[in-house]
Amino acid sequence: MKELVMEGKIQGLSPTEIQPQKAESLADERVYCDNCRTSIVDFHRSCPNCNYDLCLICCRELRDGHLQGGTEELIIEYPDRGLDYLHGIKYSAKSSKTDRLLDYTTERDSKVQKKSVPDWKANGNGSIPCPPIDLGGCGNSLLELKCMFTENWVAELVIKAEEIVKAHNLEDTSESSVQMCNCCNSVGDINLSNSQLRKAASREDSSDNYLYNPTAKDIQHGDLKHFQWHWARGQPVLVSNVLENALGLSWEPMVMWRAFRQITNTKHGQHLNVKAIDCLDWCEVVINIHQFFKGYTDGRSEYKSWPHILKLKDWPPSNLFEERLPRHNVEFLGCLPFKEYTNPRCGTLNIATKLPKESLKPDMGPKTYIAYGVAQELGRGDSVTKLHCDMSDAVNVLTHTADVKLKPENLASIEELKQKHKAQDEIEIFGASEVVDENSNGNSCGKPANDRQCGDKYLDGDDGIIPQDSQTSGSMLDGPDFLQGSGLEEASEEIADLGKSGEGGEQSEIPENELELADGGALWDIFRRQDVAKLQDYLNKHFREFRHIHCSPVSQVIHPIHDQIFYLTLEHKAKLKQEYGIEPWTFVQKLGEAVFIPAGCPHQVRNLKSCIKVALDFVSPENVSDCMRLTEEFRLLPRNHRAKEDKLEVMKMTLHAASQAAKDLDPNSDSKTADEA
């Protein structure tokens, strides 16, 4: 409506006299703002000459003189200093001073700030010229006001929705709904005898230290309300034993590989090589898929027995999961609880299902996450999903684990390398005195320093196996006492604490020497929305204490959550609580367990075993506002940021959902649906 008023001012007419042109677009086409990359839903401005499109938020910012959405591209370099550097070997303070990424980035940033930006301003009457060629436009025309739907359709929908809400008495009411949740007693305190609770935090003066954790077979009629009580409060929900609701198809990696190979041989040709992420340097490697799965089950080792941790990247391609693994797709969707939210085609409370059939849908999954893992927190090279925030809600199911045990005789070697890592951190990050590895003679692993360059690289050796150091020949897997020594007790104590559900209905604590027998596979940390500001402050304060690609220290932060470059170790989580008084919900995801993650909750994951997880995104009515808030945050990121593009189009799906709801609640209404408009 404000833009109609502005257009009336430009043309010298009243807003009611303005008749915007209807934009020409195909049903299966996504229309984005060419400046901020946010999806355009209805009103926008467009160039009649070159079709440059500008969203209304960018229009307002341009008129106000502070256009934000199209900030300049930023490139942060992470230099490759060779394989020895990854393990803190042959390093001196002198080379630190000359090679540190901080020095390079500071120089580069000063140049970026001085770079001239083409002049683009709104005219005095509020009209907006098409931007110059350097900014993607033609610079020859004024941007015209256009709309995607019939004029005033959205305004009419708002009026209709308000009438329905009033007629059906659907106004939001503040529910005193402690009585609606049997997790609480009559005075609102946590009912510790409830077996459906799992303790996940130890916050003082907090009522949300326990998470709702029913079993799949116990979910009966009425449990949807119980789920919604916790979900509406932004709390994760855990559902145990969901695979018991499935048909029993095996998720063994070789079974998946054979199923995939059978389909690809028939329809798509061979795909024997896959891309994986090496968790030590965060670079891509190309590996034979059979060898990847062999390492998943049996483990792999690198220099001096250091665990070689790989994460399979996008296999099978996420948008082809249904096509490449059709039986596993049916198995996964069939086991999901609360299908009102999780059914990707007809979930009544999944707003993503409300888009028109012919429209181009966002990729909501399912997606597989297959990665190695070990119980010990290595501190460098762990199998982790770094701290991030998804654009939407998600459910993640742990479908398979493989227990990779570290040999007791290899633990000393691993601990020695961890000490070298610590010494390297002391020099580079904390400015300690010079520390040099005097026992290293050049490249002790026998490989050229540039062997691990970022980008596609093929792992050496027959059938994709890296030759192991002569000191570490053979498997690194066997040995029952892998939890003893080398700092493993610290990790196991935290994990053992998470094996409890709470007083009364608690499970017994997991003994340290029996952790490998537990059915847990992944350690999750999920932060509350109300703690995000403090979490970001902590990361902005301590970012130089973290490493990323090539193990280079992080030198610059664009957005502490959306950059996805941090993993908070036990040490950092302790410092976070000490300095800011916040902590995440922390729990171990067990085999067959589904984790529901609300949109807007930053989270990170570390694999304690090799894991296969399958995840699905959805958009719940409770969290639509958080999806929209995240869309605005992504809009402000630099043009080349990994999270920049609005792939969800939550505004669009929300309009379609509201339109359909209005029609369902008032079937006699003559109002148009989104498709008709």
Image: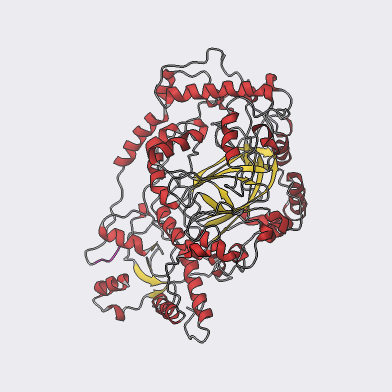
Rendered location of residue 246, percent (x, y): 73, 58
Q: Which residues are magenta?
A: 126-130
Q: Is residue 491 magenta?
A: no
Rendered location of residue 551, percent (x, y): 51, 31
Residue shown at 23%/67% (left/top)?
125
In the image, 3 versus 429, the foreground residue is 429
Render colour scheme? secondary structure
Q: Quadrant of residue 153?
A: bottom left
Residue 447 seen by the camera: no
Residue 36's place in the image compared with 382, above or below, is below
Q: Main secondary structure of the magenta part?
A: loop
Rendered location of residue 668, percent (x, y): 51, 87
Q: Looking at the rendering, in which quadrant would you find the N terminus?
A: bottom left
Residue 9's place in the image compared with 53, above or below, is below
In the image, 551 versus 119, the foreground residue is 551
Residue shown at 39%/40% (left/top)?
538
Q: Residue furthest top?
A: 438
Residue 23's place in the image compared with 217, above or below, is below
Residue 357 seen by the camera: yes
In the image, 649 versus 477, the foreground residue is 477
Rendered location of residue 433, percent (x, y): 41, 17
Asked whether, in this view, residue 500 is left or right of residue 47, the answer is right
Q: Residue furthest left?
A: 124
- How many numbered marks are there? 0
